[in-house]
Amino acid sequence: MMSKNTICLWYDGAALEAATFYATTFPDSRVGATHRAPGDYPAGRQGDVLMVEFTVMGIPCLGMNGGPGMPHNESFSFQVATDDQAETDRLWNAIIDHGGQASACGWCKDQWGLSWQITPRALMAAVADPDPAVAKRAFEAMMTMTKIDIAAIEAARRG
């Protein structure tokens, strides 16, 4: 049964592959039902995988194989709060090493073009520090990074 509010993500024939990758990479994630097209449609044929129900870190999603007409862009992303450098590295590397692309300030894209923010909780605490000078130093350090380096953020926070 579908959730009342579900994130629908458009894929060009790779919804099941993407859902499977997310389920094996992120905690509290799984692949649910797979729905096949009852007839031919512009991006596929009867019997092709049309939709995949899946969960990413507890968030219900629907992957739709709608074709190339709606590529992902940075206006939508999953922000993943990590607890330490090992978790940050594991998730970042899983995305990058599986055909993804690194970007700036903890952002990366998976091989299907979906954006992810791999964001250590230490970074969020640092840039929200009540001391504006501390927050600024941490923010400026982050602006030089691709994958977030928690030790460097904490060093910037200390000054």
Image (cartoon, rainbow, N blue to C red):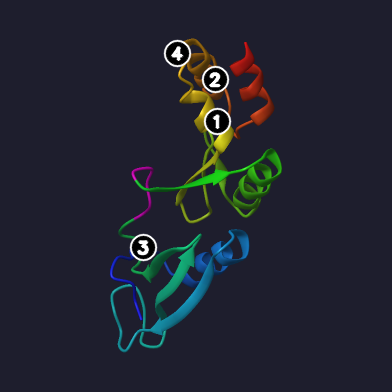
Q: Secondary structure at mark 1?
A: helix
In the rendered image, residue 73 lying in the magenta stretch gets the answer: yes
Q: To which residue does mark 4 refer?
A: 132
The front one of 123 and 109 is 123
Q: Secondary structure at mark 4?
A: helix
The mark closer to the camera, 2 or 4, is 4
Three-letter amino acid code at disc 1?
A: Leu
The quadrant of the rendering that contains the N terminus is bottom left
Residue at mark 2: 138
Instruction: Report the Cα–Cα distance between label 3 and label 1.
Output: 31 Å
- Write the start and end of the magenta stretch as one range: 71-75
Q: Which mark sits nearer the N-terminus, 2 or 3?
A: 3
Q: Pointers 3 and 1 in contact (CB under 8 A)? A: no
Helix, strand or loop under label 3 = strand
Residue 75 left/right relative to 31: left
Q: CA distance from mark 2 to mark 4?
A: 10 Å
Identify the residue at horizontal 42%, vertical 74% (top origin): 53
User: From the viewer's perspective, is residue 154 above or below residue 29?
Assistant: above
